[in-house]
Image: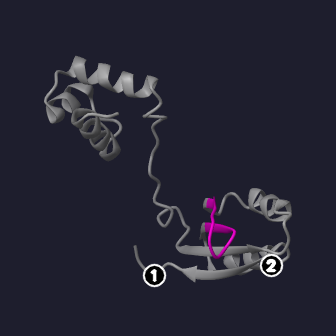
Amino acid sequence: MLDGTDKHIIEELSKNSRIKMKELGEKVHLTGQAASARVAKLEDSGVIEGYTIKVNKEKMGYPVHAILHIYTKTANHQPYLSFVKKQEQYIIHNYKVSGESCYLLECRFPSNERLDEFLTGLSNAVSYKLSIVISK
């Protein structure tokens, strides 16, 4: 069970995972050394699994943001999963979900033309419903 300080540490690391331990300690009212020890404990216990960066896909040339509800045509999902693996440069998240659809697929594309090509290939494996993200 996490205490308030651990939660505050995670919150601060979520904002800036490159923060110096001394600065983190100041924000959570610990010494830098104590903050470092807490972070190490959170890593060792598996609460913190790793550090990452957030990439702006739009600025990287992928302005078309699509959300697709995926409906498999059979109980065999392998054709869909194989297609998605080959298209991973466009995939942000591929969630297997319960409810109306089988998967929820979040993608980014450099153009509507590339999205159309993707959808044409996708339709060979599954049915889908497409939504385009207007704003975040």
Quadrant in the rendering for residue 34: top left
Q: Is residue 121 left or right of residue 26?
A: right
Q: Position of residue 90 (x, y in %)?
A: 65, 63
- Name the amino acid, label 2: Ser
- Which picture quadrant has residue 124? bottom right
Q: Residues within 10 Å of mark 1 (few under 14, many from 20)?
A: few
Q: Secondary structure at mark 1?
A: loop
Q: Earlier in the sequence, mark 2 or mark 1?
A: 2
The quarter in which the C terminus is drawn is bottom left
Q: Which mark identifies residue 123?
A: 2
Q: What x and y, as percent, mark residue 51?
A: 45, 37
Is residue 123 or residue 53 the one in the foreground?
A: 123
The relative height of residue 128 versus residue 89 in the rendered view (above or below) is below
Q: Amino acid at mark 1?
A: Ile
Residue 91 percent across, percent down from the top left: 64, 61
Splitting the image into 4 quarters, where does residue 122 fall? bottom right
Which residue is depicted at the point 85% across and 71% down? 74
Residue matched to label 1: 134
Magenta highlight range: 94-105
